[in-house]
Image (tube, rainbow, N blue to C red):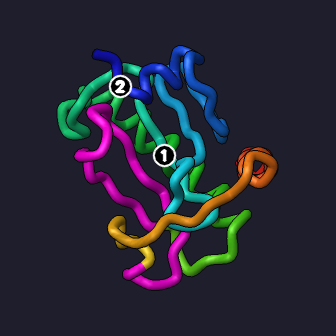
Amino acid sequence: MESIFTKIVKGEIPCYKIAETEECLAFLDVQPLSKGHTLVIPKKEVDFYFDLDDTLFQKVNELAKKVAQAIKKTIPCERIGVSVIGLEVPHAHVHLVPINTISDLDFTKKRIHLNTEEFQALAKEISSNL
């Protein structure tokens, strides 16, 4: 069965796109820990992050670096936290989360809510900082 991320890649489910390359896609997490929380995924469906071939692993991380820099320009924060958990969706992905303390990367905490217009504006602003 296809993952939700594969459906996003195929355009079957919409997303708030930040950036896209031939191999990868970056989009806002719709259940963010903080404003600007972004996911970077390979377009190819691979369940476990460390099962990505070396080239695709590098491409995901190259896009993650560029997107993290754009998020940092957009969202006031101390750092962009990076997390690879791999339990929530069976499709390799990297979380980029604006943080000010280590506890900001607690995935058990309550998520923030943004409306469609806020997501759209945020995606546009981050993209413009690439």
Q: CA distance from mark 1 to mark 2?
A: 14 Å
Horizontally, is 26 left or right of 93 in the view? Answer: right
Which range of residues does the magenta coloring cover? 81-103
Residue 84: in magenta span: yes
Q: Secondary structure at mark 2?
A: loop
Horizontally, is 87 left or right of 11 in the view? Answer: left
Quickly name the residue at label 1. Answer: 39
Residue type (three-letter) at the residue carrying disc 2: Ser
Q: Residue at x 37, y 20 (%)?
A: 44
Answer above or below: position of 38 versus 60: below
Answer above or below: position of 15 versus 130: above
Quadrant of the drawing holding the N terminus: top left
Q: Position of residue 75 (x, y in %)?
A: 69, 68
Residue type (three-letter) at the residue carrying disc 1: Leu
Quickly name the residue at label 2. Answer: 3
Q: Position of residue 116 (x, y in %)?
A: 74, 46
